[in-house]
Image (tube, helix red, strand yellow):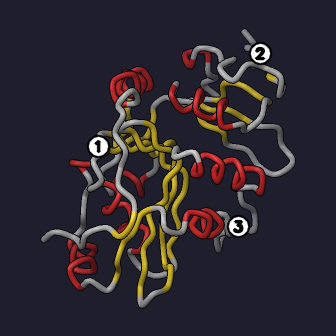
């Protein structure tokens, strides 16, 4: 049986997504196509465990993979070498001080590829969410320079991670440690990978992941911004 993806337009209601159980198995999680990146549509999507992921020149593609890579903050694995880096205190952390700089660094092509999925349209969409209080960044600083960080969407006690970058060893991992200490109950990592597994992420069945969203996205919790406290021994 050939399944036809829902095609949305910019005029489609923000919540016009099909049930996530209708997502394709191959490619894993592809659920819908089209629409736009308005704040209303993005928030409706994330609350239902759906996120956009597409390349320049493509229509917006919406995903809800099964399983879902997710991290319970208390299960974050801090390696001995990372712990040593944090104890030295050369890397300091902050939240929401340089959101635009973080997302633009994340959009820079990686060494292995000249392409990026974080298009100009994506950058502007998440900057709007940040202005509304629904997107957050964690910054890692060394000698006054931005050397790493991450950003994502924040709804209640759930942080939906989007991307991270690192210009010096352990900078993005340090940012993740800072994020894990802010009071979130769940950190969405989207796509499973061996790297995320080493940090403590697990492959969570989609139904379990979405059950967590129903419980924790409704919280009125707001994580702090500004300079974050140093790493606790």
Q: CA distance from mark 1 to mark 2?
A: 34 Å
Rendered residue at 33%/24% (across/down): 215
Total number of numbered discs in the rendering: 3
Query: How would you rate the neighbour count of disc 3 (Cα within 10 Å): few for under 14, some for 14-19, many for 20 or more?
Result: few
Residue on which disc 3 sits? 113
Q: Report the quarter where the N terminus lies.
A: top right
Rendered residue at 39%/39% (across/down): 158
Rendered residue at 27%/47% (across/down): 183
**Mark closer to the chain start, 1 or 2:** 2
Disc 3 is placed on an element classified as loop
Report whether 150 appears left or right of 26.
Answer: left
User: How far across and down, in percent of the image, does residue 217 sit?
Assistant: 40, 30
Disc 2 is placed on an element classified as loop
| Tag 3 near tag 1, CB within 8 Å | no
Residue on which disc 2 sits? 4
Q: CA distance from mark 3 to mark 1?
A: 31 Å
User: How far across and down, in percent of the image, does residue 54 sit?
Assistant: 73, 44
| Tag 1 near tag 2, CB within 8 Å | no
Disc 1 is placed on an element classified as loop
User: How far across and down, in percent of the image, does residue 91 sit?
Assistant: 35, 80
Q: CA distance from mark 3 to mark 2?
A: 31 Å
| Tag 3 near tag 2, CB within 8 Å | no
The relative height of residue 55 versus residue 12 in the rendered view (above or below) is below
Residue on which disc 1 sits? 72
**Mark closer to the chain start, 3 or 1:** 1
């Amino acid at each position: 049986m050939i399944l036809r993806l829902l095609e949305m337009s910019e005029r489609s209601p923000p919540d016009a997504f099909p049930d996530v159980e209708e997502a394709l198995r191959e490619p894993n999680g592809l659920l819908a196509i089209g629409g736009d990146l308005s704040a209303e549509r993005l928030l409706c999507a994330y609350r239902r465990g759906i996120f956009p992921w597409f390349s320049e020149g493509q229509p917006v593609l919406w995903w809800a993979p099964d399983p879902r890579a997710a991290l319970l903050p208390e299960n974050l694995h801090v390696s001995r070498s990372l712990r040593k880096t944090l104890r030295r205190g050369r890397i300091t952390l902050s939240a929401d001080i340089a959101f635009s700089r973080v997302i633009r660094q994340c959009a820079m092509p990686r060494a292995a590829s000249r392409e990026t999925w974080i298009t100009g349209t994506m950058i502007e969409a998440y900057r709007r969410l940040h202005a509304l209080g629904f997107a957050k960044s964690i910054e890692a600083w060394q000698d006054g320079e931005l050397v790493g960080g991450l950003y994502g969407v924040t709804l209640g006690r759930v942080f939906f991670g989007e991307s991270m970058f690192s210009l010096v060893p352990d900078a993005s991992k340090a940012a993740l440690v800072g994020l894990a200490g802010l009071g979130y109950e769940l950190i969405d990592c989207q796509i499973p990978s061996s790297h995320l597994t080493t940090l403590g992420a697990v492959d969570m069945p989609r139904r379990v992941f979405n059950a967590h969203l129903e419980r924790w996205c409704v919280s009125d919790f707001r994580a702090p911004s500004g300079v974050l406290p140093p790493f606790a021994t």
